[in-house]
Image (cartoon, coloured by chain):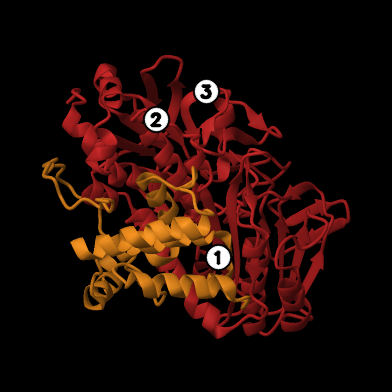
């Protein structure tokens, strides 16, 4: 079990024998004398993708254990279609048993209480009392929220971490009546899924329209619509004119969760349904464990590997990471692949910063947003590693968005999400 | 198979000549770098290049046709998602991506439709028994570089 022999090494590389026949590489591997073990904390888009690809690309040589407090992952992607009941919770829920059965990814349902990462052999201490020893740790804990005085998420859902919160918002929207007021707040950028809050406003406005009218007040902590500005401002003023009121440059002072009132720098707003999405930061475990952060919010990582800059062999991927890239499930999947490749190279003692690797390091994000119950838009961006700036830089020619919302884009949204879910969770 | 690889070998040399001004570039990706590069298409085209939705399946497609299509889209400024995505890659990178997917096995549409319709696939309950019978057999590698 602990013998990392030549046969395993060749399997690990999964590439031609010519590349692995080099004596020095083999010597290093066998001298290392360990069986590579990776623990992944968090089983969302980032965690699941990295776990799957570590197994897939190492031909099952690497032992991978995913730890998450939930038995399944509920996707934020497509979750606004659960809010409007076009989809069910089952459509966006992915059991961890799939990766276990298909790729042998181990899964432990528990939170992490602490990590000992100082030694070469790391230890992950779980809330359930277990201690897992490993060689590499990938943290993919998603997002956590800034505190807002008076905010109770059970009465004022964010529905920005999918699961029970999604159901809560869906149920509140089942109960809302025509003529009622829906108030939502949009967090300060950067946040998870740039078009998402504006998409939600559209989906909610569409629901209110069908109920005979009402108001959707969109309180944006940003100075303007931060993405697909033309599309969403057109949606707010034309498609949902008379329903949506968009107010930028908001700061939130407090929330009265019992009476559903949000107090801001531009006055108080009373709601029949209140949806506050607080400003984000990395999943709590990042700061709880004392890792360095960028802007006090995001894990400080190396974009060529997602390894923490101050902690070797510990990686942070997905929304928690501090990068120049947007935060989304699609992007988390993209980053996770770079991380999996980096870990495999580290194990096999191959350079992460070879010219050929850095010249071909790319990620991409793509996203479809429903605008009505039949139409959607799309948004896309490609990134490549820029050696001079040491970051993933957006490639201007690859940035694009739909000119119009359309039924074809709505249909494509399902093609995109089906494949994204398969690539990530299956 | 041998003939296919010989043709590709010639193509590779040609590609490197055309795109690297006559020298084998230091940035020519190694097989694992190609695998990583190509894996960034999987979010929309599926892990194995066999798409579950209506987006094209790209596994096992004819290399020349695939590359032609990618290069056409790269040259076309149409405002469409794939036309935009492709602008993020160099011609050399597209060569390697096309080669990677052309070499992957195509799975028939029939099989793929079954996967899509089978909701149980991703809604099944956690299993009671936890046998860990790991088949350690050398299953089909996705090695694509016998060059």
- Residue occupying image coordinates x 48% and y 51%: A334
- Residue occupying image coordinates x 11% and y 44%: B137
Q: What percent of the width, then of the height, locates residue A252?
A: 79, 49
Q: Is residue B38 left or right of residue A248?
A: left
Q: CA distance from mark 2 to mark 3?
A: 14 Å
Bin the neighbour count of mark 3 within 10 Å (Cα to Cα): few under 14, some 14-19, many 20 and up.
some
For residue A311, the mark is 3
Bin the neighbour count of mark 2 within 10 Å (Cα to Cα): few under 14, some 14-19, many 20 and up.
some
Above or below, comparing residue A343 to residue B115 in the picture: above
Question: Nearer the N terminus, badge 2 or badge 3?
Answer: 3
Say which chain tag 1 marks.
B
User: Does the image show residue A27?
Assistant: yes
Q: Mark 2, mark 3: which one is toward the viewer? A: 2
Judged from the image, the secondary structure of the residue bearing numbered disc 1 is helix
Judged from the image, the secondary structure of the residue bearing numbered disc 3 is strand
Q: Quadrant of residue A367?
A: bottom right
Q: Are marks 2 and 3 in contact (CB under 8 Å)?
A: no
Q: What percent of the width, then of the height, locates residue A90?
A: 37, 64
Q: Which residue is mark 1?
A: B85
Q: Mark 1, mark 3: which one is toward the viewer? A: 1
Q: Which residue is mark 2?
A: A346
Chain B: what color? orange
Q: Are marks 1 and 3 in contact (CB under 8 Å)?
A: no
Q: CA distance from mark 1 to mark 3?
A: 34 Å
- Residue occupying image coordinates x 33% and y 47%: A52
Q: CA distance from mark 1 to mark 2?
A: 30 Å
Q: Which chain is red?
A: A
- View extreme (top): residue: A119
Above or below, comparing residue A28 to residue A251 in the picture: above
Q: What percent of the width, then of the height, locates residue A197?
A: 66, 62
């Amino acid at each position: 079990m602990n013998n990392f022999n030549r046969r395993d090494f060749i399997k690990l590389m999964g590439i031609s024998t010519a590349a692995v026949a080099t004596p020095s590489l083999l010597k290093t591997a066998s001298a290392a004398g360990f069986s590579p073990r990776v623990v992944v904390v968090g089983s969302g888009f980032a965690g699941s993708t990295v776990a799957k690809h570590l197994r897939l690309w190492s031909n099952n040589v690497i032992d991978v254990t995913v730890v998450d407090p939930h038995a399944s992952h509920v996707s934020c992607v497509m979750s606004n279609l659960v809010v409007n009941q076009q989809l069910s919770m089952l459509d966006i829920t992915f059991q961890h048993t799939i990766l276990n059965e298909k790729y042998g990814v181990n899964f432990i349902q528990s939170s992490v209480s602490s990590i000992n990462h100082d030694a070469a052999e790391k230890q992950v201490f779980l809330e359930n009392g277990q201690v897992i020893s490993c060689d590499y740790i990938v943290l993919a804990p998603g997002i956590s929220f800034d505190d807002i005085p008076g905010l109770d998420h059970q009465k004022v859902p964010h529905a920005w971490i999918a699961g029970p919160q999604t159901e809560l918002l869906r149920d509140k929207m089942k109960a809302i009546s025509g003529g009622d007021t829906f108030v939502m707040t949009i967090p300060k950028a950067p946040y998870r899924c740039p078009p998402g809050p504006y998409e939600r406003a559209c989906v909610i406005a569409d629901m209110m329209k069908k109920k005979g009218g009402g108001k959707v007040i969109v309180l944006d902590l940003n100075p303007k619509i931060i993405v697909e500005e033309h599309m969403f401002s057109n949606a707010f003023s034309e498609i949902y004119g008379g329903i949506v009121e968009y107010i930028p440059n908001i700061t939130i002072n407090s929330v009265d969760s019992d009476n559903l009132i949000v107090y801001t720098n531009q006055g108080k707003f009373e709601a029949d349904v209140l949806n506050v999405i607080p400003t984000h930061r990395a999943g709590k475990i990042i700061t709880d464990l004392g890792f360095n952060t960028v802007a006090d919010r995001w894990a400080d990582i190396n974009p060529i590997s997602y390894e923490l800059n101050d902690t070797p062999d510990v990686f942070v991927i997905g929304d928690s990471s501090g990068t120049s890239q947007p935060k989304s499930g699609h992007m988390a999947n993209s980053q996770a692949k770079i991380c999996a490749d980096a870990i495999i190279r580290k194990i096999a003692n191959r350079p992460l910063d070879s010219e050929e690797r850095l010249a071909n390091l790319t990620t991409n994000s793509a996203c479809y947003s429903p605008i009505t119950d039949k139409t959607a838009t799309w948004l896309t961006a490609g990134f490549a590693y820029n050696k001079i700036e040491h970051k993933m830089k957006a490639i201007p020619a690859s940035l694009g968005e739909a000119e119009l919302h359309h039924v074809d884009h709505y249909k494509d949204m399902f093609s995109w999400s089906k494949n994204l879910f398969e690539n990530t969770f299956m | 198979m041998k003939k296919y690889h010989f043709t590709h070998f010639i193509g590779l040399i040609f590609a490197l000549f055309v795109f690297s001004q006559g020298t084998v570039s230091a940035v020519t990706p190694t097989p694992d770098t190609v695998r990583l590069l190509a894996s960034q298409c999987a979010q929309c085209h599926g892990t194995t290049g066999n798409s579950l939705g209506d987006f094209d399946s790209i596994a096992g497609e004819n290399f020349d046709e695939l590359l032609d299509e990618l290069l056409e889209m790269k040259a076309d400024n149409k405002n469409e998602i794939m036309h935009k995505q492709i602008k993020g890659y160099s011609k050399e990178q597209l060569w390697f991506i096309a080669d990677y997917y052309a070499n992957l096995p195509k799975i028939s549409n029939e099989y793929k439709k079954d996967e899509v319709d089978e909701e149980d696939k991703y809604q099944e309950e956690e299993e009671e028994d936890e046998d860990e019978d790991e088949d350690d057999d050398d299953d089909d590698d996705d090695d694509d570089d016998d060059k």
